[in-house]
Amino acid sequence: MPKKHLLSDPYQPGDENKLHWFDARLARILFGILAYAEKYFRYEVVGIENIPKKGGVILAMNHGFFFIDLAFFARHLLLDRGRHARGVAEHLSWKLPFVREIMLNLGIVDGSPKNALRILRGSHAMIVCPGGAQEAVKSSFHKYELLWNDHYGFVKVAIAAGVPIIPCISIGIDDAYVMLVNGYHRWRNIFVPLPLFFGLGLLPFPVKLTHYIGKPITHRYKPHQHKDKHCVVELHQRVLAEAERIKTIGLSRRHFFGLLG
């Protein structure tokens, strides 16, 4: 049964590895709220037809500090393609009370390779942010840089599960707040995100948000080749090249029409 009572049925260690949590009623409520929030950012998706309507697929996205764009995208994926997006979160996320209950209710699980494989072998669409928290809290001097280099986990999983990867780049999200410094710090051998930022007070700037969906990057590797460095690096380079291509298109369009246009 899905978790529905955040206070009477709180998180228990191990819940982050269970795939059956999902509260459809909560999802409908949040999607209704998001419909109004989208107007503030004039959100749109370009190229969503590139996402197949069935079958396992990895949707590789850039990670902004204010990640409401991921929720916007999940809403449109359901409305336009009839697909419920599954997500994976960083291990540190499960130490945040209330946030972790919300994530569980929305079907988000811990971002381990085992969980990712279970999602993809179940023919789901899975959202991943290869740049992780480091990309989310980077300084505005490095906005729209994709910190995916040496992050091969999502590629290995794609090979092991035999599924394509589709780069999805959000343009505008790195302008929602001004990030004053690099907010990724090491503390007791653990990296901890500590951002320093400003917007309209605590509110984000009303920038236009647009997701650009790239072409599916397919491969013919066998599942056991997820351990072959050559195969992994080659596929990673293809994915990153497509991500950079659509990012360039999106930034060019944004600069042509204006930051807020």
Image (cartoon, rainbow, N blue to C red):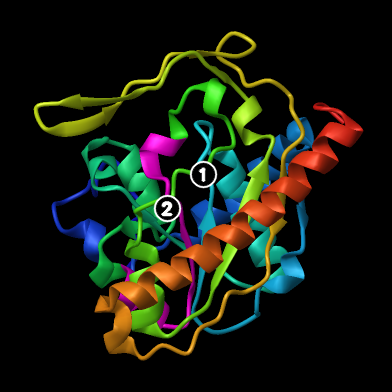
Q: Residue at x 26, y 35 (%)?
A: 97
The extreme top residue here reads: 201
Residue 247, above or below 144:
below
Location of residue 54 in the rendering, given as x and y in whole percent from the top left corner: 59, 83
Q: Earlier in the sequence, mark 2 or mark 1?
A: 2
The three-letter amino acid code for the residue at tag 2 is Pro
Q: Residue at x 24, y 47 (%)?
A: 91
Q: Quadrant of the C terminus?
A: top right
Left or right, residue 229 beside residue 142 = left
- Toward the viewer: 163 or 243? 243
Tags 2 and 1 touching, CB below 8 Å: yes
Q: Residue at x 53, y 39 (%)?
A: 67
Task: Examine the rendering and report whether any part of residue 65 can be seen.
Answer: yes
Location of residue 138 in the rendering, given as x and y in whole percent from the top left corner: 45, 28
The extreme front residue here reads: 230
Task: Examine the rendering and report whether any part of residue 19 can be seen.
Answer: no
Q: Under tag 1, what secondary structure?
A: loop
**Quadrant assignment, res 181:** top left
Left or right, residue 92 beside residue 166 = left
The extreme left residue here reads: 188
Q: Under tag 2, what secondary structure?
A: loop
**Residue 238 magenta-drawn?**
no
Of marks 2 and 1, the one in the foreground:
1
Residue 122 marker: none
Which residues are the magenta region?
116-135
The three-letter amino acid code for the residue at tag 1 is Leu
Residue 243, above or below 201:
below
- Toward the viewer: 119 or 248? 248
**Quadrant assignment, res 47:** bottom right
Residue 146 marker: 1
Residue 130 marker: 2
